[in-house]
Image (spheres, grey):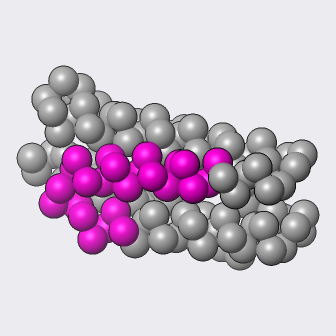
Amino acid sequence: MLQTRVLSLCLLGALALSAAGCGGVNKKACGRLENTLNGIRRQAMAQVDDPTQVARTYASGAATLRGQAKKTDGNLRKSAEKAAGALDQLGRQVQAAADGTGSSVDSSALIAATNDLKHTCGS
């Protein structure tokens, strides 16, 4: 349980990478995406003692990001969808670690996706 909690805390840091403001492509869309990621981060931090709930938060957040991505186009859409996919993947890994069926949680895909989103948004 402690290992899962520590892993969850590390993952929250990956979401924090998106906290810088977007300012280029579509400021409104970038702002919405940023707010969504920040909300996911805050919610997951509040649930750090319950990895199953953190996994659900990531899955729900991924669905929200996908919905927002559909309202954009081009590189911004691709970046948002990539972040959503990374959140889904992370949620599955956190759940597997909590269930004892998985042993590692790798946040590198989410870090790359949030960096890509920041770059697309011009920050």
List x then y, in percent, for residue 95.
26, 38
Q: Residue at x 27, y 48 (%)?
A: 7
List x then y, in percent, for residue 28.
80, 74
Q: Residue at x 76, y 49 (%)?
A: 70
| Front position in the image: 61 or 42 | 61
Q: Main secondary structure of the magenta part?
A: helix
Residue 56 belongs to the span the image colors magenta: yes
Q: Is residue 85 left or right of residue 58?
A: right
Q: Quadrant of residue 104?
A: top left
Residue 10 in view, yes or no: no
Residue 13 belongs to the span the image colors magenta: no
Residue 31 in view, yes or no: yes
The mark tally for this picture is 0
Q: Is residue 91 above or below residue 40?
A: above
Residue segment shown in magenta: 43-66
Q: Is residue 93 above or below residue 2?
A: above
Residue pushed farthest left?
1
Q: Is residue 80 left or right of residue 84?
A: right
List x then y, in percent, for residue 39.
48, 71
Q: Residue at x 66, y 52 (%)?
A: 67
